[in-house]
Amino acid sequence: MTPLEYDRARIWHPYAPLGNPPPVRMAKAASGTDIILDDGRRLVDAVSSWWCVAHGHNRPEITGAIRRQSERLSHVMFGGFTHEPAVELAERLAAIAPDGLDRVFFADSGSISVEVACKMAVQYHAALGRPRRCRIVALKGGYHGDTSLCMSISDPDGMHTLFKGIMSRQFFAEKPATRLGGKWRADDISSLERILLENGDEVAAVICEPVFQAANAMWFYDAEYLRQARRLCDATGTLLVYDEIAAGFYRTGPRWAHERSGTVPDIMTVGKALTGGHITLAATLVSGKVADTVSGGSPGAFMHGPTYMANPLACAAACASLDIFGKNDYEAMSLGIGEAFRRELSGAECLPNVADVRIEGAVAVLEMRKPPRRDEIERTIDAHGVWLRPFGNFIYSMPPLVTDGRTVARIAGAMLDLAASPPGETDSSGFHE
Ligand SMILES: Cc1ncc(COP(=O)(O)O)c(C=O)c1O
């Protein structure tokens, strides 16, 4: 068997069947915005390898930091030890986090950081003598990861319905309908308000992807929703959790998507671009009020501890990534990519199969009436040398934040070509992301 044949027969890929998956390509290397295949062809990574490769692939500053760290300390259990990269990273995250979120739990993936955020909220209420407050309110259209708790707070009609039987029951508020920057519709908040007023004594926290619902809906909603949510959480003693894993680190323009609202959450999760997409790491940032309450309760210890917690290689990579973020105007870079997409995709809304066009920061979305066909996706990728990964009815790009205008034009050309191609009837593009 060739390596590709072996892969096809034996190795699962995300959201794909074993044995007959959609085609996979053999990546040999990557550099800048490009993924380089074994036959030498280059594909522009128009989705930043699921939105994490913020500075481009294989940045020498980050690979160098990982190499140097590996010569000293590749790993040590975080139970009973600490190390410089973890301490440095915690300090630096606290410095750029929203006000007061200066307590840090390091997790090994975004999903785990969300699990930690929810468990922290439950343990907070338990410490205050409110053990009944152990459910989460999430938003329809949201996505927070694939582990069991994360599935239970992701869109209830999304891809996880098969697993309802093992999920804990949570509350779901309606997806906010007011578009980002649109005229605020007061009834947008009424669903969340009703849940908190009627069931607040069971709710530990409200969680949302602030402003940008990514992996399920590719939807940008108005920041007023967050102000209203903050007000309701304060009134009902509920914690507010922002999941900035997809939107954080300038993806939608500002460093944190929620900055537009002027609100501060009690807990926030970050991941993906944290290490510039070089190695897995996420973090749950927690306010002193929550951390002190958890620590002051029984058992005091926060009950979570992954084997690879605060892995030194990952922490060193994240510090190097934060250096790069600090040396460049990433907000301007992100907005510049948005401007280029706006130019290059103008007129897309006139294509018969395009239902809506949404562009914010370095995110460009064509919402289709019918999904693109699998063979058309493959043809487009090969013809344009642009790696796209449409899902559901969405053809979208979230390229590395260092992508230049010419490359954005190439990506937009590929998106338009695919959007104009004959559509499929049902989604055959891979269910997710
Ligand atoms: C908003 C959000 N939260 C959580 C996750 C889960 O992160 P991970 O895939 O690193 O577990 C994702 C992944 O796409 C995400 O977009």
Image: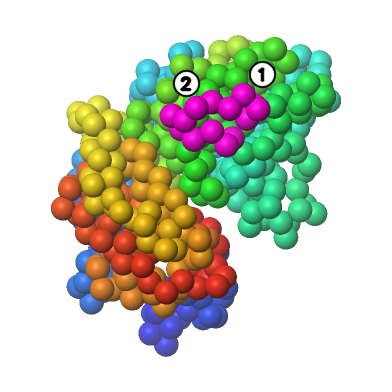
Residue 388: which quarter of the image? bottom left
Q: Quadrant of the N terminus?
A: bottom left
Q: Mark 1 points at which residue?
A: 233
Depicted 134 relative to depicted 67: above or below = above
Query: Which residue does the image show at 76% across and 26% down from the upper left?
Result: 194
Q: What residue type is labelled 1?
A: Cys
Query: Which residue is label 2 attached to?
Result: 261
Tell me: 253 left or right of 205.
left
Task: State which region is magenta.
Answer: 176-189
Mark positioned earlier in the residue sequence (1 or 2):
1
Q: Is residue 104 visible?
A: no
* Residue, far bottom: 1
Q: Looking at the picture, how far across and down is residue 55, in whole percent?
A: 26, 43
Taking 242 as reference, is 403 left or right? left
Residue 328 vs residue 430, the one in the foreground? 430
**Nearest the eye: 159 or 360:** 360
**Callout 2, which amino acid?**
Ser
